[in-house]
């Protein structure tokens, strides 16, 4: 479809008034055939109304000669045979010849239906000329010209449209705005609407139109100024209030929220603004206030299960677990919200309450829907946490899988549980088998490499990471893992340092990569530089392995007391970490 016609979103509604009406002198000809196309159906219901209007028209007295009859028949036959362009052209020629507004109206509809911009403009222009009081003709002509970027040609018709019905000026500006925001030349559209709206400073919709077009043109300052005038003129207009608040949110969220709060207080029955206010509070992470607004909406609409569910989730977010449980159970009892979703969140709630047995039961009740995969993941996690590795793996194997990413996730979680159980060989086998199925899957390649490293399979480790870097040359973690392995094994130090520095260039804020660079400087004997990087890494993430490295460097610098303090604090929260225990034992036997 021509992109021009995609823009005319209001035109089908306007065209519903444009039905086929035979001219007075040629009734038999135009009723001889009826177009079978579906596009003629929507306008059929308007026949009676337009027939009544026709009696008021000053119609020409045109005799039906053979040539004219032939053209009527030709137009209808063309339409029946799927030639709308020919039909439109035929009826346009007839309209020019007969000067009958009803024929012009039919020509305009056919030209529009056949996606002919120039013909549509010509036909609607003729109809408007022959029937100056027809608002649809004028509105359609305005719409076509504006959507086609013909602003100069549209201006006189816009002026006529507003002057003809000054009480409907607001509606006219709303229609015009909806077309202008889609204009390719945003700046030209903005200049034009400013000129058109200038004589109407008291029409709120005129300021709304300028604000909308200004925003589409990237002029936020003008948009704010204009929409504020619109709100001032019509303080009860919810659309204008929400638009102004939306514009203010990025730079002044407090002011925007205050505007929405005041409107909701002044017009408590306006559900649209209150809902927008509630969602905006939610976006701003003001959960207690958001819940209050959702609760007010729910009080006005107690059967709305989505509102009840939103209130319950906000109680969960706020950590009010007893209240959240009561609200979720009430939502479940209503029976309108899908039970699987509610059971999933009840599982989340029970986990937060440290009741893993009940959480497992809730997750087990999630049988279908968007949360099945996540529920099975949580089941496997809780079973594994309870020491039931085989049962956890069985849950993973029975989990319905969707796309490739979900399949890979299941495999990696399975391997992780095996690794946590210190079944390193089995974990490596699971990942290696999966890599045969998904040979270039980046996440799997990285996990296989790390599992190989854990088993001391240095050749597999290095080959897999180098292949990964061929597939994904910007993979910072692969550079880091490969470089750190060389540094840790104290081999090919220069190459190892180059690799971790490459990772650092890609992700300079990653604590693990900063730690690797610091450790590389330590291996190269640059203790001051090493301590600088390791302190940065530890400040960003007090990880036990980073603590082990920093302590070793500090010890080597002669700062044993600080090293001991860092190790001691790290041991409190990570007593089982192998790297930390090994380093501490090395220096403090």
Image (cartoon, rainbow, N blue to C red):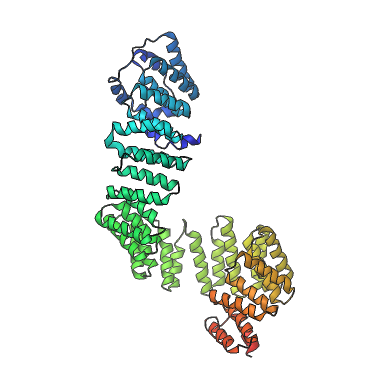
Residue at left 50%, top 70%? 382
Q: Position of residue 69 (x, y in %)?
A: 42, 12
Residue at left 28%, top 33%? 165
Q: Residue furthest bottom?
A: 589
Q: Is residue 571 left or right of residue 451?
A: left
Task: Please say if 378 is above or below 530.
Answer: above
Q: Is residue 207 left or right of residue 74?
A: left
Q: Is residue 470 left or right of residue 372?
A: right
Quadrant of residue 461 in the image? bottom right
Residue 430 makes an appearance in the image: no
Task: Name the residue nearer the viewer: 325 or 254.
Answer: 254
Q: Position of residue 515 (x, y in %)?
A: 61, 74
Task: Please say if 8 is above or below 344.
Answer: above
Q: Position of residue 369 (x, y in %)?
A: 46, 56
Q: Is residue 410 left or right of residue 32?
A: right
Q: Position of residue 44 (x, y in %)?
A: 36, 26
Quadrant of residue 264 in the image? bottom left
Task: Please say if 518 is above or below 259.
Answer: below
State how many labels appear.
0
Residue 375 makes an appearance in the image: yes
Task: Name the residue nearer the viewer: 238 or 314.
Answer: 238
Residue at left 49%, top 62%? 374
Task: Please say if 104 is above or below 5.
Answer: above
Q: What quarter of the picture does the C terminus occupy?
A: bottom right
């Amino acid at each position: 479809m021509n992109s021009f016609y995609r823009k005319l979103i209001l035109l089908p509604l306007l065209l519903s008034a444009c039905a086929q009406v035979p001219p007075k002198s040629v009734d038999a000809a135009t009723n001889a055939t009826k177009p079978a196309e579906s596009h003629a159906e929507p306008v059929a219901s308007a026949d009676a109304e337009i027939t009544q209007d026709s009696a008021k028209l000053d119609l020409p007295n045109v005799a039906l000669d053979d040539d004219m009859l032939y053209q009527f028949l030709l137009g209808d036959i063309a339409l029946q045979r799927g030639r709308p362009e020919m039909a439109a052209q035929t009826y346009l020629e007839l309209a020019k010849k007969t000067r009958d507004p009803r024929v012009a109206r039919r020509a305009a509809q056919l030209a529009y239906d056949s996606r002919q911009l120039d013909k549509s403009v010509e036909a609607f222009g003729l109809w408007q000329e022959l029937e100056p009081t027809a608002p649809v003709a004028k509105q359609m002509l305005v719409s076509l010209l504006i959507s086609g970027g013909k602003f100069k040609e549209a201006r006189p018709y816009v002026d006529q449209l507003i002057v003809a019905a000054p009480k409907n000026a607001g509606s006219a500006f709303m229609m015009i705005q909806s077309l202008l925001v889609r204009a390719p030349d945003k700046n030209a559209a903005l200049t034009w609407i400013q000129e058109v709206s200038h004589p109407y400073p008291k029409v709120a919709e005129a300021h709304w139109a300028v604000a909308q077009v200004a925003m589409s043109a990237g002029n936020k300052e003008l948009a704010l100024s204009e929409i504020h005038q619109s709100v001032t003129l019509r303080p009860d207009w919810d659309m204008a209030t929400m638009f102004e608040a939306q514009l203010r949110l990025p730079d002044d969220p407090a002011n925007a929220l205050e505007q929405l709060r005041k409107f909701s207080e002044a017009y408590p029955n306006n559900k649209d603004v209150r809902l927008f206010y509630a969602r905006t509070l939610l976006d701003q992470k003001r959960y207690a206030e958001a819940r209050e607004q959702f609760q007010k909406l729910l009080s006005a609409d107690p059967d709305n299960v989505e509102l009840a569910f939103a209130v319950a989730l906000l109680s969960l977010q706020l950590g009010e677990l007893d209240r959240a449980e009561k609200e979720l159970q009430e939502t479940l009892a209503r029976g309108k919200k899908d039970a699987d979703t509610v059971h999933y969140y009840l599982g989340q709630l029970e986990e937060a309450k440290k009741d893993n047995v009940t959480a497992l039961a809730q997750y087990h009740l999630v049988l279908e829907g968007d949360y099945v995969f996540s529920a099975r993941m949580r089941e496997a996690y809780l079973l594994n946490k309870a020491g039931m590795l085989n049962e956890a793996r069985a849950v993973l194997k029975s989990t319905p899988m969707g796309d490739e990413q979900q399949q890979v996730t299941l495999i990696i979680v399975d391997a992780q549980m095996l690794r946590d159980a210190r079944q390193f060989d089995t974990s490596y086998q699971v990942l290696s088998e999966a890599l045969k199925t998904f040979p270039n899957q980046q996440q799997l390649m990285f996990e296989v490499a790390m599992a190989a490293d854990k088993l001391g399979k240095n050749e597999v480790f290095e080959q897999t990471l180098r292949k990964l870097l061929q597939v994904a040359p910007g993979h910072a973690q692969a550079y880091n893992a490969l470089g750190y392995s060389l540094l840790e094994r104290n081999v090919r130090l220069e190459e190892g340092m180059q690799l971790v520095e490459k990772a650092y260039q890609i992700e300079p804020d990653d604590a693990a990569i900063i730690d690797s660079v610091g450790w590389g400087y330590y291996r190269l004997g640059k203790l001051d530089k090493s301590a600088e990087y390791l302190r940065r890494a530890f400040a960003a993430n007090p990880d036990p392995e980073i603590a082990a490295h920093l302590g070793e460097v500090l010890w080597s610098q002669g700062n044993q007391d600080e090293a001991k303090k860092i190790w001691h604090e790290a041991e409190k929260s990570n007593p089982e970490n192998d790297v930390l225990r090994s380093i501490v034992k090395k220096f403090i036997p």
